[in-house]
Image: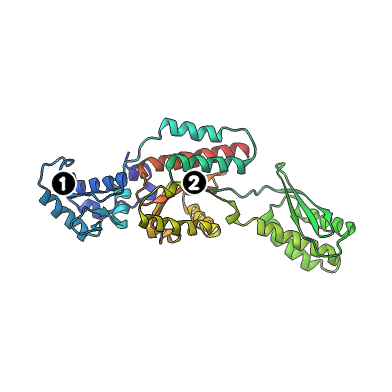
Amino acid sequence: MKWRETYPQMTNGPKLLDELNDRSREVFRLVVEGYLETGEPVGSRTLTRSLTEKISAATVRNVMQDLEHLGLLDAPHVSAGRVPTQAGLRMFVDGLLEVSQLDSDDQSKIDATLGSNARDTGAMLDKLGAVLSGLTKGASLVLAPKHEAPIRHIEFVSLAPDRALVVLVQADGHVENRVFTPSPGQTPSSMREAANFLNNIAEGKTISELRETIKTEIQARRQELDGLARALVENGLALWEDGGESYERLIVRGRANLLDTDDSESLERIRSLFDDLERKRDIAEFLDLTEEGDGVRIFIGSENKLFSLSGSSLVVSPYMNSDRKIIGAVGVIGPTRLNYGRIVPIVDYTAQLVGKLLSGRD
């Protein structure tokens, strides 16, 4: 299956490819496929054994030179073979990439991970990340969904003079507990007052809907709300706001897979990639861009500003809930010579399956 036929919403149908003659197109395709398979430059003599048209190595070199002038191929060393440039890889992905059917063994491994009836979404997505990195030999990224059910009840519990617990019970039965440091002098009375205040305005609202309401209500009712209780509410609100940031929802697995190389230049790029992967907030915000449209997206090299220095590629797809709202994403990152034809259906299938599973739980 052609990439642009299977995922037409993610490609633009490159005009330059249509302008190449059959010979140039075949040489280009074989260079890219050879590079993706071996990671090595592809020479003219190697190509003459694979071309459908019997032509000399000198003729092949002329074609490769023309493709180099077009910015699609590059010669890393004098008298060496050619490798695709980033522009060449993009054109190959958009116009010539053959997307395979999902392998049955790969599907079974993914299904086994998601087949658990446990309601621990975080644990399930963590296992999913490990399976994805294992199947693709790259690093996996899983952007977990925010839990946005309406609130049923909020409670504050004193644990020690300098520690308190805020308990959030949501309408779907989901319970979250977080420990924080309250202001000095909190009493059981101020805790009850804070909880009563929140429960009066919180029921039926999600956390995101509650945030602005709390700020407005505190300003309007500052006189009737005890200072200690007001501080407790504000501290509790700050705790949920900090905890709800998207960068905490990013799961990264399989970075060790990227170290399987003897190339010192590649190792340096991988070190740069590891630095990028540590900036979880930035990556999560980038993955949020997948909410601009559904379907698999491929970012190559500097097309993804986060990974431009490491020259990496990212294959990513969002997943949806039962209301067809995008709530997260799954993806695979690795060198630009990823096996795109195999990884695209793995990422696509996984995203769809996660969406179905979470919709069923909803």
Relative to 300, does residue 352 appear above or below in the rendering? above
The residue positioned 42% from the left and 30% from the top of the image is 104
> Which residue has dot 2 on it?
254
Camera-side residue of 237 and 107: 107
CA neighbours of label 1 inside 10 A, class few (<14), some (14 to 19), many (20+): some
Residue 108 in the image: state x and y as whole percent.
Answer: 48, 31
Left or right of residue 177, residue 103 in this image: left
Residue 125 in the image: state x and y as whole percent.
Answer: 57, 42
Camera-side residue of 1 and 52: 52
Work out which quarter of the rendered image holds the C terminus and state it: top right
Q: Is residue 231 visible?
A: yes
> What SS does tag 2 mark?
loop
Question: What's the amino acid at mark 1?
Answer: Arg
The residue positioned 71% from the left and 59% from the top of the image is 239
Residue 153 in the image: state x and y as whole percent.
Answer: 78, 49
Cα separation, mark 1 vs mark 2, equals: 37 Å
What's the mark number on residue 45? 1
Work out whether mark 1 precedes mark 2 in sequence or the reverse, and give the earlier one. Answer: 1
Residue 324 in the image: state x and y as whole percent.
Answer: 54, 44
Q: Is residue 317 visible?
A: no
Relative to 243, does residue 103 appear above or below in the rendering? above
Work out which quarter of the rendered image holds the N terminus and state it: top left
Question: What's the amino acid at mark 2?
Answer: Gly
The residue positioned 84% from the left and 56% from the top of the image is 160
